Amino acid sequence: MTRACYISALVLAAVAVGCTSRPPEAVDPALAAEIENIRAIDNHAHPARPTAQGEAPDRFYDALPVENLEPQSDPVGLQPGSPASVEAARAMNGARGNTAKVLDVMGIETMLANRVEMGPGLDPSRFRWVPYADALMFPLDTSKLAAKNSDRKAFFALEDIVRRRFLSEAGLQSPPGSLADYLAKVVTPTLERHRQGGAVAEKFEAAYLRSLAFDPVERAAADRIYTRGGALAEADYKPLQDFLFRYIAAECGRLGMAVHLHTMAGAGGYFEVAGANPLLLESVLNDPSLRKTNFVMVHGGWPFIREIGSVLTKPNAYLDISAQTLLLPPSSVAASLREWLAFLPEKVMFGTDAYPYTKELGWEETGWIAARNGRQALAIALTGMVREGEITRERASQLAHMVLHDNAKKLYGL
């Protein structure tokens, strides 16, 4: 279904109601049409750049591609042959290979591209870079961390590749002998190169590798762990990771970049959902030394919907609805949106989590599905708020623009 057909279907459905004895439509058709026509800023996605015939497929759309995991029970939204995937393929017919046209079909003005590196075919005026920083937290041997399960084994092997890349860019073959040199010669220069390369934020997929409980750690304690080196057990390695995360976050604030964190149940049968609870980030958000850094909790924390809402009162805390719009029905996302928009609407942003899962469901199709569902969820939430007298129709329009565009524009200075 094209965007125009979708609007028409909503309008026709509203007209067809006719009889006042039938319940009102869940969506105000005029509001839905307005929402559909707002060109959005997508806060989180993984676009793959087009490649020429004979060229190796693009693999830089994720530092930790999910195809490296053991099989899991896939949600309905990711199963091949679903009605949504058929609609998405039809909508994207003729757009594949032209990334700007893909964004136009999705109704997206600017997409924040989570990628190890950018490349040809991703116009920097439409795609803004969000590179990965997790590898900087693991300067020492990760073999004991990787031994936990097959997913961690695959992921830490991939992080080793990214870490070697960072070291090579710093002119090194291995991490320096002291923590001070590691910070000065690897961590800070890497972040500065990212910023100079156009990055607006740094992404952490840390919840796939460990919990989000980044405790405060004294520099001396981190120094001792770094100097000790070797393959450390999880408990012994964690304080160094915690120190490095906060150092990286502070540097991001200094450089004018936000910090993005995966906060949602994740891919893979071994993913530890409890470790992605946004409440684990509270000590980070309460750290006075990090108040100049903006933290965006990507994917809206599902299933910790109310937990994530409660920490939005922190002045530097934000969230987006990416992935939820792909994996959950619009009515479920609408319920969460309604709570957040009644609480702190200036902290809520639109996102798709467009991702090249399969040949049938590439980033183009998943992005289209998530964008459609996200707009529908927003329309449902705002319609309910208007009809129950919580906000005016004019305020609903303002909130729609904030979520889809203005909040992100302000946060990143786009």
Image (spheres, grey):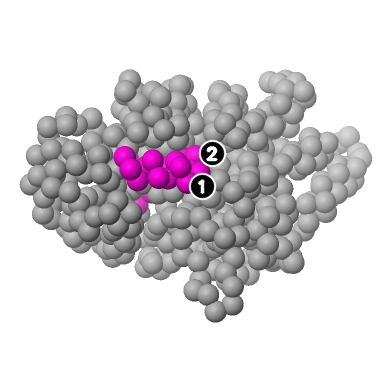
Looking at this view, is 368 or 76 the one in front? 368
Residue 250 at x, y percent in the picture: 34, 31
> Is 44 in the magenta?
no
| Secondary element type, mark 2 | strand
Mark 1 vs mark 2: give the one in front. Answer: 1
The answer to the question of whether label 1 and label 2 lie on touching residues, with beta carbons closer than 8 A, is: no
Residue at the spot of label 2: 320
The span picked out in magenta is 188-214
Residue at x 78%, y 52% (from the top left corner): 3
Q: How crowded is mark 1: few (under 14 residues within 10 Å), some or many (20 or more)?
A: many
Cα–Cα gap, marks 1 and 2: 17 Å
Residue at x 20%, y 51% (from the top left corner): 175
Residue at the spot of label 1: 129
Which of the 4 quarters of the picture holds residue 410?
A: top right
Please tell me whether residue 390 is drawn above or below residue 294 in the rendered image. above
Q: In the displayed image of the protein, which residue is found farthest to the front?
A: 171
Residue at x 39%, y 41% (from the top left corner): 192
Q: Is residue 342 visible?
A: yes
Say left or right for 168 vs 225: right
Which of the 4 quarters of the picture holds residue 389?
A: top right
Please tell me whether residue 357 is drawn above or below residue 36 in the rendered image. below
Residue 148 at x, y percent in the picture: 22, 59
